Image: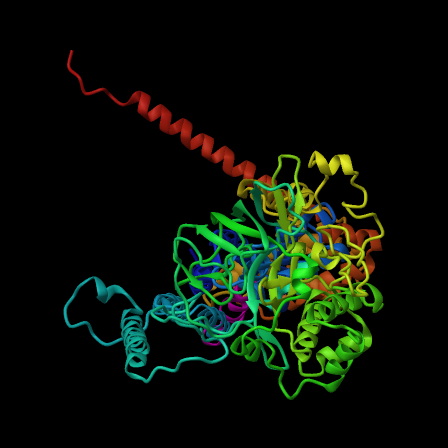
């Protein structure tokens, strides 16, 4: 193996070793095999282009083009031309996947699920870094700067992952870089021949190695530097926190040992979930009640409102009790029913909080979970999440009447103080609008229903998931003015307005009930993600309201006329799992009552899940298609590549001995005759060099300058063939190139194209292969005859 080929392998290996730092970020880590395979193909293409050889920028360009084609084959083959050539649709597909990957990175905790977008980001990033390392270290022969892209790759991975195994990934990345430096040093030393390193102390194997002393010294320096890099940080003061630092103690992804829930905002990805192109199933469940329209799967409650955002307050947690206590504020005279729900979360869905119906009275689940009693939520401890979880929840369906809500007494002072707190930064228009909308109400229940009606029906609000969530104290005021948004805006605004009226309020985050399936189960997809306000009424407890138009279901207790009130009947929005704008009728609208009864309505979530397909093929298919693509594109170009390679060898550098000069002269003459052959002047081996030169000048119509060059080259060939002491002649390569330019100028456009893409002289490859095959057959026949004639060595 040549020194440059060895250096290319080291560059690829160094990139892959640095990429191992990304392994803790995603589960499963099978993407590394795809990245390694594509990186090997990228390295092979670079080795082939350098062997031709091509100009350095052209070599990098060819590698980049092949890398793009490989990524197209892997991630956008359906949008590409013949599955491998990228076009506008393929680039659009890349954009969609990268956007989805970016959203997934912000949505999931580590380790994130291996979605198509994240896979493209990982594999594509490794290939880009690999291309940069290969170009710097191998093509441009400068391995030291190649450490910068390797450092960037490791730094991003280490900054995101953290953890106790960070030293292992650093060790791998550093070892790969040192290996690359040593390989480049050995390659450079080998070009100078044997390096004098002083007389060996004792004769031995090392004394015969030219570059042993420098290589041994480099290894020692590298080992010492690596040791210092690993040991010194242990003595430095630790720095906690930061942009990429982890927070929380004992819960979620924290380090454990604590007893509080950190204030983490779970709304960061709700809008992205509603806007996904493909509604992936988050979970499915079965329950023993036929009425699932109010069975919202609640994840967490947001009860801390600082005027800028709603978030869960930092609260104490405890072990999950066998039976959860009775919900706060729920009186014995309120009608209720107990139901059992069995839930199965998707393997890719990783959520720290456990989605379950509210209020739950008993939860059976395996794993490390803790209970937060105020919000009645379960939160994962020490990295526990919902990925692939299967659990049972016994919960209550609370059915208060409008009269019970209307006659609810004032809550306790402590509860009212905590859950009616409004920051001073809240714009006055929020409270003013609340008072205007609820004017004439005689109790908090009437105020709550009027607020719900204002947002869902009479206020002319428009549901739009493309609206930004917004931040700052003016976000709610801007929403009230522009009157467009999605569930976050509606729930935030109603909860804030309720607090200004003295009604305890908070925001819940979770999922709407989902869509019934033909097998009796319910399917919950990404587009079922939702946020809604919960208002507190003494004697009933925390009660759900639905201000978001065309989402979920309006609770029954807000649709009944109460004696002595003027609360209108609120139209009931249809149940639909799809929230994306569509001209087609929704699933619920096109589903008849009989179909609902039989639970045979089609589900957008289920259809998307069943109809979707994974963009990853088995490796043997990708390998086969990649090889087929390379053959389709490469085979027609093989004659051209062979001629470029032979021209470079014949006219390249050579030694300074007489034998080298003779070989160089004959090679230059061979190049001229082959070039003439490519342009239609077939060689005549029976002619002398002088006559052959005159024939090329005559048939090629060469100008005087090119004619003189041909004759000079022919004279040099005759001197090599016939002179007793041939002398080297300078400028033969320039003469050969001058002749080639003259032949190209005098040829027609078709002739030039034929000479470039299908050179006639490429037939020499077939002749050489035939000669080698004949020689091999002769050697095998001689070997077989020798074996047959050898005496057996046995005596009769």
Q: Quadrant of the C terminus?
A: top left
Q: Quadrant of the N terminus?
A: bottom left
Is 103 left, or right, of 224 in this rendering? right
* The quarter of the displayed image where residue 536 is located: bottom right
**How many discs appear?**
0
Residue at the (51%, 72%) spot, across then down: 149
| Residue 132 visible in rendering | yes
Residue at the (57%, 73%) spot, across then down: 411
Q: How is the image coloured?
A: rainbow
The secondary structure that dominates the magenta segment is helix
Residue 134 covered by magenta stretch = yes
Residue 291 covered by magenta stretch = no
Residue, far bottom: 424
Is 256 left, or right, of 93 in this rendering? left
Region of the chain picked out in magenta, as a range: 127-146
* The quarter of the displayed image where residue 303 is located: bottom right
- Residue 118 lies, in percent from the top left, at 57, 59
| Residue 131 visible in rendering | no
- Residue 329 lies, in percent from the top left, at 54, 65
């Amino acid at each position: 193996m040549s020194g440059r080929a060895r250096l290319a392998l080291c560059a690829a290996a160094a990139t892959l070793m640095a990429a191992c730092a990304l392994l803790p970020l995603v589960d499963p880590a099978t993407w590394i095999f795809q990245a390694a395979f594509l990186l090997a193909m990228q390295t092979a293409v670079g080795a082939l282009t350098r062997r031709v050889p091509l100009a350095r920028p052209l070599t990098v360009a060819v590698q980049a083009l092949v890398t793009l084609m490989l990524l197209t084959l892997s991630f956008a083959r359906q949008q590409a031309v013949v599955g491998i050539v990228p076009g506008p649709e393929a680039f659009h597909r890349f954009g969609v996947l990268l956007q989805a990957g970016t959203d997934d990175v912000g949505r999931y905790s580590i380790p994130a699920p291996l979605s198509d977008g994240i896979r493209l980001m990982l594999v594509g990033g490794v290939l880009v870094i690999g291309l940069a390392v290969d170009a710097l270290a191998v093509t441009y022969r400068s391995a030291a700067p190649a450490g910068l892209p390797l450092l960037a790759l490791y730094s991003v991975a280490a900054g995101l992952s953290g953890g106790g195994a960070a030293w292992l990934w650093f060790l791998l990345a550093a070892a790969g870089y040192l290996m690359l430096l040593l390989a480049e040093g050995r390659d450079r030393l080998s070009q100078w021949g044997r390096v004098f390193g002083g007389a060996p102390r004792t004769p031995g194997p090392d004394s015969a190695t030219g570059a042993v002393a420098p290589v041994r010294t480099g290894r020692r320096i590298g080992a010492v530097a690596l040791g210092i890099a690993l040991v010194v940080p242990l003595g430095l003061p630790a720095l906690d926190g930061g942009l990429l630092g982890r927070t929380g103690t004992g819960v979620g992804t924290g380090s454990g040992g604590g007893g509080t829930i950190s204030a983490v905002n779970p709304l960061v990805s709700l809008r992205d979930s509603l806007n996904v192109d493909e509604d992936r199933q988050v979970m499915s469940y079965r329950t023993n009640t036929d009425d699932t329209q109010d069975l919202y799967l609640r994840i967490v409650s947001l009860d801390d409102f600082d005027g800028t955002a709603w978030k869960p307050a930092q609260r104490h947690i405890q072990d999950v009790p066998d039976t959860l206590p009775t919900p706060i504020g729920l009186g014995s005279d309120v009608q209720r029913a107990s139901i059992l729900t069995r839930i199965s979360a998707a393997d890719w869905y990783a959520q720290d909080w456990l989605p379950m119906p509210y209020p739950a009275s008993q939860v059976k689940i395996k794993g490390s979970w803790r209970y937060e009693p105020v919000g009645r939520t379960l939160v994962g401890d020490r990295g526990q999440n919902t990925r692939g979880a299967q659990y049972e929840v016994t919960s209550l369906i609370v059915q208060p009447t409008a009269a019970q809500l209307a006659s609810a007494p004032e809550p306790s002072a402590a509860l009212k103080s905590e859950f009616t707190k409004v920051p001073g930064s809240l714009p006055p228009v929020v409270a003013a609008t609340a008072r205007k909308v609820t004017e004439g109400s005689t109790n908090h229940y009437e105020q709550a229903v009027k607020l719900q009606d204002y947002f869902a029906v009479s206020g002319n609000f428009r549901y739009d998931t493309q609206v930004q969530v917004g931040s700052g104290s003016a976000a709610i005021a801007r929403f009230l003015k522009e009157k467009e948004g999605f569930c976050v805006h509606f729930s935030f605004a109603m909860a804030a307005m309720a607090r200004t009226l003295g009604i305890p309020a908070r925001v819940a985050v979770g999922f709407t009930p989902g869509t019934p399936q033909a097998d009796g189960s319910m399917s919950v997809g990404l587009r079922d993600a939702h946020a809604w306000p919960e208002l507190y009424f003494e004697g009933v407890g925390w009660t759900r309201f639905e201000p978001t138009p065309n989402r979920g279901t309006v609770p029954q207790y807000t649709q009944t006329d109460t004696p002595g009130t003027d609360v209108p009947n609120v139209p009931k929005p249809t149940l639909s799992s799809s929230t994306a704008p569509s001209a087609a009728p929704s699933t619920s609208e096109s589903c008849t009552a009989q179909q609902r009864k039989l639970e045979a309505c089609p589900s957008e979530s289920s259809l998307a899940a069943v109809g979707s397909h994974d963009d990853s093929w088995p490796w043997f298919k990708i390998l086969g298609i990649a090889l087929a693509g390379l053959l389709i594109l490469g085979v027609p170009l093989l004659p051209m590549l062979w001629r470029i390679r032979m021209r470079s060898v014949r006219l390249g550098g050579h030694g300074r001995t007489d034998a080298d000069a003779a070989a160089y002269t004959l090679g230059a003459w061979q190049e001229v005759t082959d070039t003439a052959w490519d342009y239609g002047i077939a060689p005549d081996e029976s002619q002398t060099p002088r006559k052959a030169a005159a024939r090329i000048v005559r048939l090629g119509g060469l100008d005087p300058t090119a004619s003189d060059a041909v004759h000079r080259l022919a004279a040099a060939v005759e001197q090599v063939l016939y002179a007793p002491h041939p002398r080297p002649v300078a400028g033969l390569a320039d003469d050969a190139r001058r002749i080639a330019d003259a032949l190209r100028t005098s040829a027609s456009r078709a002739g030039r194209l034929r000479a470039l893409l299908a050179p006639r002289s490429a037939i020499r490859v077939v002749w050489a292969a035939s000669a080698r095959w004949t020689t091999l057959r002769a050697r095998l026949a001689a070997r077989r005859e020798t074996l047959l004639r050898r005496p057996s060595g046995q005596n009769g």
